[in-house]
């Protein structure tokens, strides 16, 4: 599958079959995330893989949506603020680095026939507390991963036309 096809295939899945993700699929997804580029190659991230019912229930407290509990695993991506690169003008790049890694995860999951969903609208402060994360580490993205529920198909993506977003100079 070429990259455009993969990008088209990936969509936000909010209904999962509950079927487990294989260890081989998980390792492939994590390896793809590990290979993501980051500013100055500092890789200021941690990927918390939550597969146990207990750990998944902790994260469900931080994002109370019924569909979330259907996914067999979650990957929580955190940025380490004491590791991230900071540009001379003070612009911190940890969130950018995490975004790249998160999309690598979502695309790798899609390539494996799995669904995923970016979740940023969760209670990061509660998540930080429940997981007892270091002070310098911030939870940024929660990604549920699993096989999409039967009958689920991607809808046509609503995207702006290139003429609306590309400026040639």
Image (cartoon, rainbow, N blue to C red):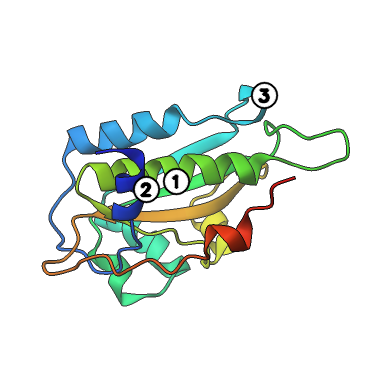
Give above or below for 151 relative to 115: below
Whether residue 94 appears in this view of the structure is yes
Please tell me the numbered disc located at residue 135.
Answer: none
Within 10 Å of disc 1 (Cα), the crowding (few <14, some 14-19, many 20+) is some
Most foreground residue, 58 or 69: 69
SS category of the residue bearing label 3: helix
What residue do we see at 30% from left, 57% from top?
54
Specify which label sits upstream in the sequence, 1 or 3.
3
Q: CA distance from mark 1 to mark 2?
A: 5 Å
| Residue found at x 61% / y 63% | 164
- Quote the CA–CA distance across marks 3 and 2: 23 Å
Above or below, 79 against 161 in this view is above
Check contact, mark 1 vs mark 3: CB within 8 A: no
Name the residue: 37% across, 59% down: 117
Q: Residue 40: which disc?
A: 3
| Real-space CA distance between mark 1 and mark 3, rounded to the nearest whole angstrom | 19 Å
Residue beneath label 2, please? 106
Q: Is residue 49 visible?
A: no
């Amino acid at each position: 599958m070429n990259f455009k096809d993969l990008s088209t295939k990936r969509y936000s899945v909010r209904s999962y079959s509950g079927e487990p993700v294989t260890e081989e699929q998980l390792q492939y997804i994590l390896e793809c995330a590990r290979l993501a580029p980051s500013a100055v190659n500092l890789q200021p991230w941690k990927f918390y893989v939550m597969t146990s019912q207990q750990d998944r229930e902790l994260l469900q407290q931080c994002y109370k949506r019924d569909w979330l509990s259907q996914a067999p695993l979650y990957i929580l991506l955190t940025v380490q603020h004491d590791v991230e690169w900071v540009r001379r003008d003070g612009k911190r790049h940890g969130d950018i680095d995490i975004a790249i890694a998160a999309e690598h995860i979502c695309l790798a999951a899609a390539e494996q026939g799995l669904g995923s969903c970016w979740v940023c609208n969760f209670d990061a402060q509660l998540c930080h507390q429940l997981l007892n994360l270091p002070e310098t580490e911030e939870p940024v993205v929660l990604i549920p991963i699993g096989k999409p529920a039967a009958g689920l198909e991607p809808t046509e993506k609503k995207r702006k036309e290139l003429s609306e977003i590309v400026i040639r100079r």
